[in-house]
Image (cartoon, helix red, strand yellow):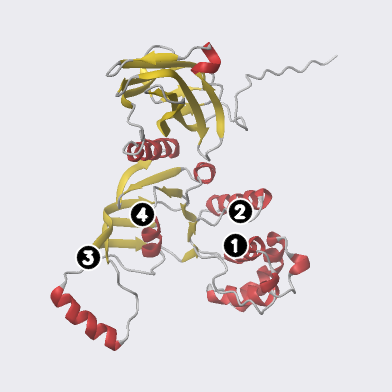
Amino acid sequence: MNAPAIELNAVSKQYRLGENGYRSLREDIAELFRRRRHEPRLFWALRDVSFAVDRGEAVGIIGPNGAGKSTILKLLSRVTKATSGAVKIEGSVGSLLELSAGFHPELTGRENIYLYGSILGMKKSLIDKKYAEIVEFSGLDQFIDTPVKRYSSGMYARLGFSVSAHLDPDVLLVDEVLSVGDYAFQDKCIQKMKAYRASGKTVIYVSHNLDSVRSLCGRAILLKEGRVGYDGEVEKAICEYYMHSSQGQRARQDQKGAFEILDRKLIDSRGRACVIADSGERVRFELTMKTQEEINEAYYAVFIRRSDGFVVFDTSSDLLNGIRYGHGRAEKLSLKYELSINLLKGTYTLGCNIFGSLRDGPVECLFYEDNIFAFTVKDNISHQGIVNMNAKCSVDAF
């Protein structure tokens, strides 16, 4: 049995907060005396993280800011060392972490390809061989002899990605670089990463763009506060990420103090609580809540977003029923929305706005939560787009 390409075993990484990477002798002596008076502030970026990645596997690492994603990439790229535990990597490692960090603004695009390629460890003979491919991939052939100081930020990043993407490592580390350029170039980047995976290379991809994780990766690892919160199917990892984010929002959800959410759930067409629905299935969202104040002229809006934040549906009780409600203090409410989930495969979130009048004041937003519930839609057919149009096709010869 072949060894994994990457293996992390009980890895932890600790940082001392407020320290710079390099100090002078005078600063070191001053720090020595300061430590006698003050204990250093310690921060664990990773705690007891373990996972393995096989050759040819593309794994996405997701999670909120500060969860430890970039620290894992630094460990894998050998920029830093683990405080405890073991990190093992089989084969050569290439990193697409800081695009164009080695560019010289006074040099042309052509000259910077050789400069940046050499910084990345490419030999001149390899750059010569791949030069035409790099330029063609970047789409900057007409500007290649122009100093890069005249490039736009998008052109700068495209050239950096094009050089980096033509490395030939066994393990490729990618950090938020597929957002460069326009849509066509982003798609080209995704296809390049898929080609790496298809050729048996191992890809570790860190991104907040969950659609690109879904497109590129066959597995995802969710980090929560430096620990592995979930490791497995991409859609399940994304759903867990949304649920974790939702929990983090609840302390901020009700600035007016008018409502308390007691329960939230999705009921499928068979009357069972679930977090997964079939595309086209009729489902019911239920929110159970309690009023904290007397409320008049109340109406309830819900909206559904896909993973990139795009709102795919938005409606309200006022629009649907033409009714506004009055509620007494400490009254329990059950808000129900029945919907046909004519959406394609993916993970979505339900948000909620509640409007009303407090103490005979103006109608205003009393409650808002952007991510009150996360759910996954299954679709056995690989459609493209946003909605399920229940298409049928026939071909008749005559």
Label 3 sits on residue: 41
Discs 4, 1 touching: Cβ within 8 Å: no
Nearer mark to the viewer, of 1 and 3 = 3
Label 1 sits on residue: 161
- Residue 136 in the image: state x and y as whole percent: 72, 62
Q: How far apart are marks 2 and 4 (CA)?
A: 26 Å
Q: Earlier in the sequence, mark 2 or mark 4?
A: 4
Label 4 sits on residue: 66
- Residue 192 in the image: state x and y as whole percent: 60, 54
Residue displayed at 62% across by 32% down? 385
Q: How far apart are marks 4 and 1 (CA)?
A: 25 Å
Label 2 sits on residue: 189
Given the image, on which type of amino acid does mark 2 rest? Cys
Q: Distance between the residues labelled 3 and 4?
A: 16 Å
Q: How far apart are marks 1 and 2 (CA)?
A: 8 Å
Where is 242 relative to 121, above or below? above
Residue displayed at 54% across by 45% down? 212
Asked whether, in this view, residue 307 is left or right of residue 127, the answer is: left
Q: Label 4's element?
A: loop
Discs 2, 3 touching: Cβ within 8 Å: no
Using the image as rendered, state which of residue 360 and residue 382 is in the foreground.
360
Q: Label 2's element?
A: helix
Q: Label 1's element?
A: helix
Asked whether, in this view, residue 33 is left or right of residue 63, the answer is: left
Discs 1, 3 touching: Cβ within 8 Å: no
Nearer mark to the viewer, of 4 and 1 = 4
Given the image, on which type of amino acid does mark 1 rest? Phe
Nearer mark to the viewer, of 2 and 4 = 4
Discs 1, 2 touching: Cβ within 8 Å: yes
Disc 3 crowd rating (10 Å Cα; few below 14, some 14-19, many 20+) is few
Residue 206 appears in the figure: yes
